[in-house]
């Protein structure tokens, strides 16, 4: 016969386990309640240019930094910007050039961590039009796809047209999104050319070996040739009022992106791909991996804005937009490096 004291041990163990589980649940709930909720509007989550924003979520870096992030995937950077200006999102994960463009309209936007050293924009001719579109000048009167009208892809197209002696409005702009929708529009002949980003460019090249590329900014060399200097691409930004009023959340987001950039540059393309959502990778993993290998050098190692790069953005926009050229913009107000500098002091993630 089992003594009463021995019979009570399993009960005590059960109670202890339940108490432990309840304590863990309470702590987890308290932690979640303590974390601030931030909604980030992404200007096309399938695009590799925005990979650090998505990967930070996959790695749990936002939670580690103390912020509860919801990512909202939109068709293009202009749509993401509208979400923040309209109040349905807090922060944009998009191209820095919007901050400069909106400054001309007296709207104060501020980038606080940069994750793309180069814009990665590629002006590509549709496979069916390879023989009759051989230069940017041949785009006059043609239908050219962009992610969304008013997005960075649209700005880049206008800049390239102007640079080649054409009216920036001489091509018809068609919004085709990013990813599969853009590839389909190109292959089905709905448009004559498009400004695209990886992995879409590499996907097209995989099916069309003779794909004609008119301009490419995926590397430092190509970026310098196109813009005459460094040209920052993707960044996290918001209204100056939100950044100033949410210093804790802004710092947490900065810390998370910096930790993710450090992780990217210390892991293989295969390891990075393994962490990404299946819908981002798509069915052809080989092509995604090839595109990722092309893109990794584009990602910043420091998260900091190079003031000369910001000046280059202003110069480019001044060429294509009289409104920007005449606005006397103080470009130093469109970004801040203080959160990256603070992260360097506290976490050592920034260089």
Image: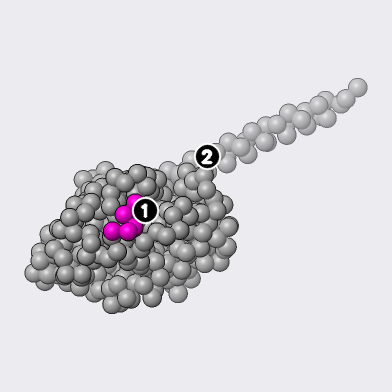
Q: Are marks 1 and 2 in contact (CB under 8 Å)?
A: no
The residue sitting at 36% across, 53% down in the picture is 127
Horizontal and vertical percent for residue 84? Answer: 25, 49
In this figure, which residue is indicated by the disc labeled 2? 26
SS for dot 2: helix
Is residue 38 positioned above or below 322 on the image? above
Q: Residues within 10 Å of mark 2 (few under 14, many from 20)?
A: few
Q: Look at the image and tell me in which quarter the N terminus lies.
A: top right
Q: What is the total number of numbered labels drawn onto the structure image?
A: 2
Q: Nearer the viewer, residue 22 or 173?
A: 173
The residue sitting at 20% across, 70% down in the picture is 163
Question: In this orientation, does residue 131 appear?
Answer: yes
Q: Residues within 10 Å of mark 1 (few under 14, many from 20)?
A: many
Closer to the chain start, of discs 1 and 2, is: 2
Q: Does residue 83 appear to the left or right of 127 in the view shown?
A: left
Labels 1, 2: front one: 1
Is residue 158 positioned above or below 147 on the image? below
The residue sitting at 57% across, 40% down in the picture is 23
Q: Does residue 54 appear to the left or right of 79 in the view shown?
A: right
SS for dot 1: helix
Question: In this orientation, does residue 102 appear?
Answer: no
Which of the 4 quarters of the picture holds residue 139?
Answer: bottom left
In this figure, which residue is indicated by the disc labeled 1? 127
Instruction: Tell me, yes or no, whether the highlighted magenta stretch contains residue 129.
Output: yes
Q: Does residue 98 appear to the left or right of 44 in the view shown?
A: left
Report the span colored magenta.
128-132
The residue sitting at 73% across, 34% down in the picture is 13
Q: Look at the image and tell me in which quarter the C terminus lies.
A: bottom left
Horizontal and vertical percent for residue 301? Answer: 45, 70
Q: Nearer the viewer, residue 125 or 241?
A: 125
């Amino acid at each position: 016969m089992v003594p009463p004291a021995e019979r009570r041990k399993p009960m005590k163990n059960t109670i202890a386990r339940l108490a432990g589980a309840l304590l863990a649940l309470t702590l987890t709930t308290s932690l979640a309640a303590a974390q601030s909720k931030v909604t980030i509007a992404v200007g096309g989550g399938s695009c590799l240019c925005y990979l650090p924003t998505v990967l930070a979520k996959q790695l749990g870096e936002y939670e580690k930094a103390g912020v509860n992030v919801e990512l909202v995937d939109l068709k293009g950077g202009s749509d993401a910007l509208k979400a923040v200006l309209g109040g349905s999102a807090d922060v944009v994960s998009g191209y820095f050039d919007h901050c400069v463009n909106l400054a001309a309209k007296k709207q104060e936007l501020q980038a606080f961590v940069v994750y793309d050293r180069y814009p990665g924009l590629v002006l590509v001719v549709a496979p069916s039009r390879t023989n009759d579109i051989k230069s940017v000048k041949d785009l006059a009167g043609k239908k050219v796809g962009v992610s969304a009208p008013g997005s960075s892809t649209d700005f880049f197209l206008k800049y390239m047209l102007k640079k080649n002696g054409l009216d920036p409005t001489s091509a018809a702009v068609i919004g085709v999104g990013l990813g599969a929708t853009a590839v389909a529009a190109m292959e089905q002949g709905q448009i004559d050319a498009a400004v695209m980003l990886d992995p879409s460019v590499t996907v097209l090249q995989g099916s069309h070996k003779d794909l004609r590329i008119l301009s490419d900014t995926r590397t430092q060399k190509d970026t310098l040739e196109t813009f005459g200097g460094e040209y920052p691409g993707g960044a996290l930004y918001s209204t100056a009022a939100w950044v100033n009023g949410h210093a804790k959340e802004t710092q947490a987001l900065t810390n998370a992106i910096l930790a993710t950039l450090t992780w990217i540059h210390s892991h293989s393309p295969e390891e990075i791909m393994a962490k990404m959502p299946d819908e981002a990778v798509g069915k052809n993993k080989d092509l995604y991996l090839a595109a990722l290998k092309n893109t990794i050098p584009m990602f910043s190692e420091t998260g900091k804005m190079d003031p000369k790069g910001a000046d280059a953005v202003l110069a480019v926009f001044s060429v294509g937009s009289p409104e920007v050229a005449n606005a006397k913009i103080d470009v130093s107000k469109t970004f801040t490096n203080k959160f990256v500098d603070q992260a360097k002091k506290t976490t050592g993630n920034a260089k």
